[in-house]
Structure formats: C-alpha cells, structure tokens
C-alpha cells in the first residue's frame, strides 16, 4: 500500500482556520495517512436524516491536496444524544441491572434493534458519501470494540439474543440442562425463555452458563461489526476495512473478528496512566504485538501509538527523548506495516484533555514533533520493502480466548491470570532474543520446533489428538498445570486422572494437586532452589523423567517438571507456575534441547526482532532504556541504521539486513 506513518486527527475540535497549519506540519513531519471521525456522529448528523459531511469532505480534500490519505472511523461507539433521547433503551444495562447513561462514550447496547437500524441508516449514508472520495483509502469499524463493555449488556434485547444463541447451539433445553450441569442447585430450565442474561445473583454462578455467556458476547460483537462491514463492503469495494484492537483484551475473540477485516490494527499505550510505572515492561509490549500479528497471521497497523503523556484525570509519566521512537520501531519490528500516532494535537476539551499528542495544547511543534519527524526521516525509506514481511519463528505459544474465559470464571488460584501466565513463558524466550508466534489451539503447528501450550484447561478429543499427533511426528511440546481439567462445556472431566489422555504423551499422571493459596512454594532444579507460585501438581511418573522436584510441603522430593520422549518427539510437563528465575533456566534448557536459533546476547532492556521476505531478513536491535547498552549478534548482518554494532545509545534503534536463500 506504501503507507507507513500517520496520526489520529480530530479537525472538528479546532477552528477551520487552523487546519491548513496542521496539515502543512503533518506533511513536513512525513505523515501519509490520518484516521478521522470515529467519534463525530453528532457533527455528521445533528438531527435524524440531516447529514453534514461537508466539514469532513473539506478536511479530507485539504489533506489530500498535501498527499495525505484518510481512514474513516464509523462513529458508532458514541451515539448522539438525540438518538438516546428518542430511544433510551439503547443504553446498556450492567450486571446489577443499572442503566449506563449518556455522558461518556460506549453508552450503547450492541444487540438493540433500534440502535442497529440507526447504524444501518448512518453507515449507509456515510459509506455512500465517501465511496468515491479519492482522499479516502479505508475504514475503521467503530472504535476498540469491547472497550467499556465489560459486564454489558444485560438488557431484554440481549436476553432474547442470548436465548436464541443457546437454542441454536443446543437445539433442546434438555441438552442445555445436561451441558450446563443444571442438576446442581436445582438450576434446571423448562424452556429457553427462562434463561436470563447473568444478572447479579444471591451467590455464585454456573461456570458452564458463564462460559456460554462470554462466547455469546464475543459473537454478538463480531455480528455488530459485521453489520457495518457488510454495508461498507457493498458501498466501498475499493476501500479496506480494519478495526483497532486492544492487544490481549478479551471481550471479543479477536481471531473471529479478524475474519471480517482486511487487516488487523492495534492500539498501544506503553506508559498510560494505568500502567506499571514508568512504563509497561517491554516484553509485555512485545507480546502484545506478537499476539496481534497472530490474530490474522499477517502484518498489521498500529492505529494508535502513544506519542506523549497519557491519562484522563491523572497522568502517566513523561515520555523520554527517544522513547516514543523506540516504541514505534518496536511495533514495526514485530510486524506493523503502518504506525499512526495518537493523537495529532493534545485536545483542549473533554475527557481526554491530558492524553497528549504529537503537538501539545499550544499547537506549536516541540520535542515530540521533531522526534517523530526525525524517526520518519530515518526509517521511512525502508518501510516499503519491509511491508508484508513476517518474522521467521521456531517457537509458538498457544493462545485461546476460550481458555481465558474459563479461567476468568474460575481462576483456580485467586491470582491466576491466563494472559499473565502465558506471558511468563513468552518472557523466557523474549529475554533470550528468540522470536515467538502466538497461535490458536487448532492451528497447524507442524513447522514449529517448540510449542508451548500453557493452561490447556478446557480439553476436547480433537485438541488431544492434535497435540498427540504433533509430538508423535517429532514435535516438542510443553504442557502445564491445569491441563485437561474440563470438557468444552466447562464441566470437570471424570474418566481419567489428570491430565487426561494427554498423560500418554507426558508419561505422567496427576492424582492430586495443591493450590498454593497463602504462600509460595519452591522447587529444586539442577541443585538450586527456585520459588514457584500458585500451583503444585503432585505428579506420578508413568515413564517420564523428573527434571525438577518440589522442595516444600508434604510432596517435597516429588516431580514438579517432567520430560518424556514420545514417538519422534518430546513433551515437558510443568506442574506449577515458575517465577522468573526458574523460567530463565527452563527456557535456556528448552532452547538448547530443541536447537532453537537465538538472535544474539543482550541485557533485558535490549530487544532483537526480525522480519523477512523471500530474499532478505531485517534485524531490529532496540535499546528501551535511557542508558547505553552493549550486545552481540549471533549472525553477520549489514548495518543499515545505527552507529556501531554492539553498542546502543539510550533508546537507539538499529536496523540490519542480510540476504537469505530459502530452501
Ligand atoms: C484509546 C481510544 C481512543 C482514545 C485513547 C485515549 O483507547 O481508542 O479513542 O480514547 O484511548 O484514551
């Protein structure tokens, strides 16, 4: 597409007389694209059927006259007051039965038929109006679907939709009663009409019902997006359609949503006011990029890249000189073909007055502007060739929204968090400069030298076979605690000891376990003691070899981590959640056992990542700290950008290339 750097721009927040100054500054900075209008419904339709797209057309044609293209957002995350006033039931109901009212954003129920009809009218008009506008190249549907909809919506419309969804899935109420285990606590239903959205109960919830509810909500959001995507596809066949994701957020299954889109986009705020200060650990940001690349198995856009201080009522830390560039190039290194900075100019009004942009409130170009300009000047010329390239990965981590849902419903240990747990494995490899892919459970994993499948809590016969076949055919697989506990309906398995049929490829059985509720435990690995947390599977060896044993509690000296050769391959079972030190040892061991390529050696603030096409590999080396760093590479590359191989200045980004011959 040839478009690589942009900004999120809100011309409607500023007098028209200022627009040309903005656009000139953008042009000088190297901006090629802007995202516009995703919260501007009222400006575009102040009364029903009274469309005012002229201001947007003026902004687009001004931008286009400077060669800057536009991505239009559909403004459906903020329906205007006149729609709400006429139809208050569009506002969502939370699980305590309270309505969430107009005055912020996301005050919409996504199943509400009246709201859907307003969307149809508006998106039809908007997409028809801009279909042939030469300044427009694509669309972003809504904004961050799932954001602010955490326990929403419990209204009557959602209830009816949920009942239909269940009827469709189960066919008869008897089948549902069986699947949900409603014999427990007299929860049986006589008909689908008796089933409600999960409102607050006196105590407890049915885990099977809750799993279906979460899957229903995800399907509803996908359907909500499809409602718009279908209209835009029909009216604007030459435009792309994307959506701005939120990393690992799990309100909607992003793999499902991705099927509607030409490509996925993501929003990334490493130093938002909610982050661990001063910024999110770099491995977590890297993992977010890698999962986003995995949602469609292709490069992506960053639709919102943090550029400066982020916050609403309170603020996060100032972004240090060079830090924004390091974050932006980290996005590129992990697969972004385009990066749009949020936002062009810091807004003077509304909730986000302190969410700073490329320009401050004054609108004068300052440190952030000049840094962005320099970044685009330095790296812009490589972006065309990089477009479409992907990393060459040997390690995959399995990621699943359903496992995440099930463990949100019953975390087993109060602090067990699905994403945090799988990212502990990620960090082990990230710290050793090993590129990692995230894959879905049933994806073809045959190309990977090592597959880590943490917390395979919900199990199906197909998934068991998938893993058994992978190992039998020479794959290396890591399985962990809480594997094979439940069936697909979130009901505990009863026919075998844990980890169920997968015990066959692990060479173990787990007749007992211990939730490390109040204190941490420890294990002995290679004669050293390491802390563990959350869980201890008490393992009986059935052919496997123990490579680490517990050193605490009544099961001390029994296996905690095991290794087993099966067929042509090998399986490891980790019966606990390793802490960082142990994860370092374990990942190093797995890297050497599976002969995995590492890109080089560096401290933890330095990141290495590659992208490659059919004939070339690019290597990014990024210093995420404000101090000088040293590193060494394991292969020979030609330096394209940077001062000295092996040395990095604070926040320096270096770029290398080498030719490759694909077998
Ligand atoms: C994002 C959102 C933007 C803006 C930004 C700052 O999550 O997509 O619209 O709100 O955060 O809060």
Image: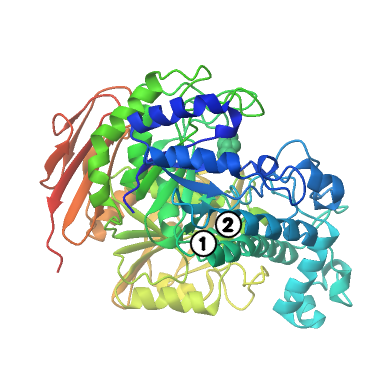
When the figure is inspected, residue 610 is found, relative to residue 447, above or below; the finding is above
Cα gap from disc 1 to disc 2, whole angstroms: 7 Å
Residue at the image point whose x is 32% and y is 42% from the top? 431
Q: Where is residue 127, by image quadrant?
A: bottom right
When the figure is inspected, residue 659 is found, relative to residue 30, above or below; the finding is below
Q: Where is residue 627, by image quadrant?
A: top left
When the figure is inspected, residue 333 is found, relative to residue 242, above or below; the finding is above
> In screen coordinates, is 172 left or right of 500?
right
Q: Report the image quarter containing ligand 1.
A: top right
Q: Where is residue 567, by image quadrant?
A: bottom left
Label number found at residue 634 = none
Residue 511 in view of the camera: no
Tally of numbered discs: 2
> In screen coordinates, is 6 left or right of 120?
left
In the picture of the structure, the residue carrying the numbered disc 2 is 127
Report helix, strand or loop for mark 1.
Answer: loop
Among the two numbered marks 1 and 2 on one chain, the one whose residue lies closer to the N terminus: 2
**The N terminus lies in quadrant:** bottom left
Residue at the image point whose x is 59% and y is 53% from the top? 250
- Spot occupied by residue 605 in the image (x, y as percentages of width and height): 32, 32
Residue 269 in view of the camera: yes
Which sits in the foreground, 397 or 514?
A: 397
Which sits in the foreground, 289 or 351?
A: 351
- Spot occupied by residue 577 in the image (x, y as percentages of width and height): 49, 50
Whether the residues at callouts 1 and 2 have beta carbons within 8 Å, the answer is yes
Q: Residues within 10 Å of mark 1 (few under 14, many from 20)?
A: many
Residue at the image point whose x is 38% and y is 68% from the top? 544
Label number found at residue 236 = 1
């Amino acid at each position: 597409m040839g478009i690589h750097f942009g900004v999120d721009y809100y011309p409607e927040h500023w007098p028209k007389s200022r627009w040309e100054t903005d656009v000139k500054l953008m042009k000088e900075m190297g901006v090629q694209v802007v995202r516009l209008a995703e919260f501007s419904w009222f400006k575009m339709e102040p009364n029903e059927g009274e469309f005012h797209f002229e201001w947007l057309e003026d902004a687009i044609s001004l931008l286009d006259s400077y060669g800057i293209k536009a991505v239009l957002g559909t403004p459906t995350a903020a329906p205007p007051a006149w729609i709400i006033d006429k139809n208050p039931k569009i506002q969502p109901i939370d699980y305590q039965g309270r309505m969430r009212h107009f005055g912020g954003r996301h005050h919409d129920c996504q199943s509400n038929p009246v709201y859907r009809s307003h969307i149809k009218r508006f998106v039809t008009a908007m997409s028809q109006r801009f279909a042939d506008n030469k300044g427009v190249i694509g669309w972003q549907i809504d904004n961050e679907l799932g954001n602010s909809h955490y326990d929403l919506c419990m209204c009557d419309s959602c209830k009816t939709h949920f009942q239909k969804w269940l009827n469709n899935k189960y066919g008869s109420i008897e089948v549902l009663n069986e699947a949900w285990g409603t014999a427990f606590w007299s929860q049986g239903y006589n008909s689908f009409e008796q089933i409600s959205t999960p409102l607050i109960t006196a105590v407890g919830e049915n885990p099977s019902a809750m799993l279906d509810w979460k899957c229903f909500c995800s399907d509803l959001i996908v359907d909500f997006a499809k409602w718009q995507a279908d209209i835009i596809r029909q009216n604007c066949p030459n435009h792309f359609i994307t959506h701005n994701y939120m990393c690992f957020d799990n309100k909607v299954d992003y793999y499902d949503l991705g099927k509607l889109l030409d490509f996925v986009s993501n929003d990334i705020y490493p130093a938002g006011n909610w982050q661990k200060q001063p910024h999110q650990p770099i491995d977590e940001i890297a993992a977010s990029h890698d999962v986003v690349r995995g949602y469609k198995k292709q490069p992506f856009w960053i639709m919102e890249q943090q550029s400066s201080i982020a916050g609403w009522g309170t603020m996060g830390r100032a972004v240090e000189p060079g830090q924004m560039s390091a974050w932006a190039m980290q996005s590129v290194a992990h697969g972004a073909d385009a990066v749009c900075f949020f936002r062009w100019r810091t807004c003077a009004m509304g909730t986000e007055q302190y969410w700073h942009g490329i320009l401050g409130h004054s609108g004068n170009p300052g440190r952030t502007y000049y840094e962005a300009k320099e970044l685009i000047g330095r790296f812009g010329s490589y972006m065309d060739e990089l477009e479409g390239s992907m990393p060459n990965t040997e390690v995959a981590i399995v990621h699943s929204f359903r496992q995440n849902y099930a463990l949100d419903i019953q975390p087993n240990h109060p602090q067990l968090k699905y994403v945090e747990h799988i990212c502990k494995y990620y960090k082990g490899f990230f710290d050793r400069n090993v590129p990692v892919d995230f894959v879905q459970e049933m994806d073809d994993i045959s190309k990977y030298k090592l597959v880590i499948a943490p917390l395979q809590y919900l199990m199906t016969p197909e998934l068991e076979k998938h893993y058994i076949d992978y190992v039998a055919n020479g794959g290396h697989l890591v399985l962990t605690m809480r594997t094979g506990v439940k069936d697909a309906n979130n009901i505990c398995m009863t026919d075998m000891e844990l980890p169920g049929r997968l015990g066959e490829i692990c060479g173990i059985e787990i007749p007992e376990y211990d939730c490390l509720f109040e204190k941490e435990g420890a294990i002995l690995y290679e004669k050293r003691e390491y802390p563990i947390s959350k869980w201890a599977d008490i393992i009986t060896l059935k052919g496997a070899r123990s490579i680490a044993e517990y050193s605490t509690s009544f099961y001390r000296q029994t296996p905690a981590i095991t290794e087993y050769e099966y067929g042509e391959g090998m399986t490891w079972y980790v019966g606990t959640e390793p802490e960082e030190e142990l994860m370092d040892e374990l990942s190093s061991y797995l890297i050497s056992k599976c002969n995995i390529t590492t890109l080089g050696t560096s401290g933890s603030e330095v990141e290495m990542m590659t992208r490659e096409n059919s004939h070339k590999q690019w290597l990014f080396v990024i210093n995420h700290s404000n101090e000088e760093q040293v590193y060494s590479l394991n292969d020979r590359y030609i330096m394209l950008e940077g001062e000295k191989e092996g040395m990095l200045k604070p926040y320096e980004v270096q770029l290398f290339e080498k030719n490759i011959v694909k077998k």
